[in-house]
Amino acid sequence: MPTTLGELARLVGGDLRGNAAIQLTGASTIDVAGPGQITLADHPDRARSLLASLAAAVIASPDVDCGGKPSIVVPDVHAAFATAVRHFRPLRIVQRIGQSPQASISPTAKLGANVDVHPGASIGDGVTIGPHTTIHSGVRIMPDCVIGSGVTLFPNVVLYENTRVGDRVIVHAGAIIGAYGFGYRQVDGRHLISAQLGNVEIAADVEIGAATTIDRGTYGPTVIGEGTKIDNLVMIAHNCRLGRHNLICSQVGVAGSTSTGDYVVMAGQVGVRDHVHIGDRAVLCSKSGVSNNVRAGEEVLGSPATPIRQAKLQMAAVAKLPEMRRQFRIMQRQLAELLGESLADDSDSNECAA
């Protein structure tokens, strides 16, 4: 919806600096914003990009030099810009549909008030679903699962039997919760699958990304703690117990029976071996290979992962190796030349003595 800079300033509760009558037709980031659009600048280092931007105006934090560009100054740039984006691109109002006749719902399933079940979803025997939950098309909920209130399962999510999902959980498309763990025992030269008698328990306010997999426990539960956020394409193996409010980025793999404390961060492509513990507020930097316990509050990097200061020193030393090798070869040649001259001197002295 088109608006003026002044109207938008009132909407976001910001301090207007510039012509209130400027007409705005949209909101976009600095790199792609065009004439008639408003952008955002959340840090002083955005000033140069802002100067080159075609945007008509900017929502900025107080420490940003806007270079004379019309602006709305706010303490929380991202909250204000999100409000602006929603003004220009309002959320589509989703109509409640109830339980579609094209869905397969067991007569023994118990659904709370205002549960939406879209066409093509399948809900098994003994399933319990809390109120205001949305089950999208292609979702498969196997028997005896328990799902809380306000949950959203996006298309093609699969919950294996006995999965427990807390209130307000979001599971994105294609995620698989409760598949068998990768555990085998060898008998007479054959790999026989181990017990798969556990389940998965997901606490309240967890978000699970698209195509992520969380395996069931062997005998007990694999647990995802309250408020933990898991990105797309993450693998959580059997018997893991993740703490509260962890952040697990894309392509992380966590092997079986690993546990974490609260507020742990695992950056992209981290790999964690089995049976280790990651302490509260530890940070595993991108591509770290974790093979031992990580202490609370520690930041690690590298493979094998080591404390970040030590890892950076190691990487700096490795970067110097080509030059060190070149210098070493020069020293080798110099030493050979010196030794050759010394031998020649010895030979001359022996001849004179004779």
Image (cartoon, grey):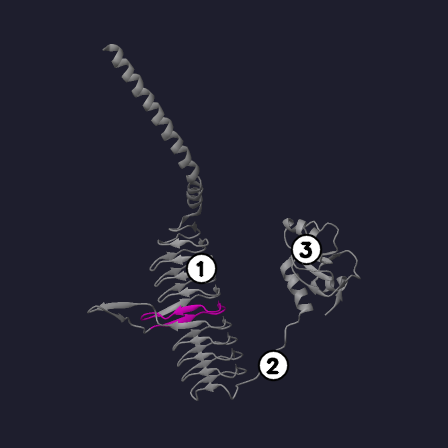
Quadrant where the image shows the N terminus: bottom right
What's the magenta bit mostly, secondary-structure-wise? loop
Residue 131 lies left or right of residue 41; in this view the side is left
Q: Which residue is mark 2?
A: 95
- State how far apart marks 1 and 3 are (Cα): 33 Å
- Magenta residues span 198-220
For label 1, the SS is: loop
Q: Which residue is mark 1?
A: 262
- State how far apart marks 1 and 2 are (Cα): 37 Å
x and y, in percent, of residue 141 in the image: 43, 79
The verdict on residue 107 being magenta is no
The verdict on residue 214 being magenta is yes
The residue type indicated by label 1 comes to Asp
- State how far apart marks 3 and 2 are (Cα): 36 Å
The residue type indicated by label 2 comes to Gln
x and y, in percent, of residue 248 in the image: 46, 61
Residue 297 lies left or right of residue 67; in this view the side is left
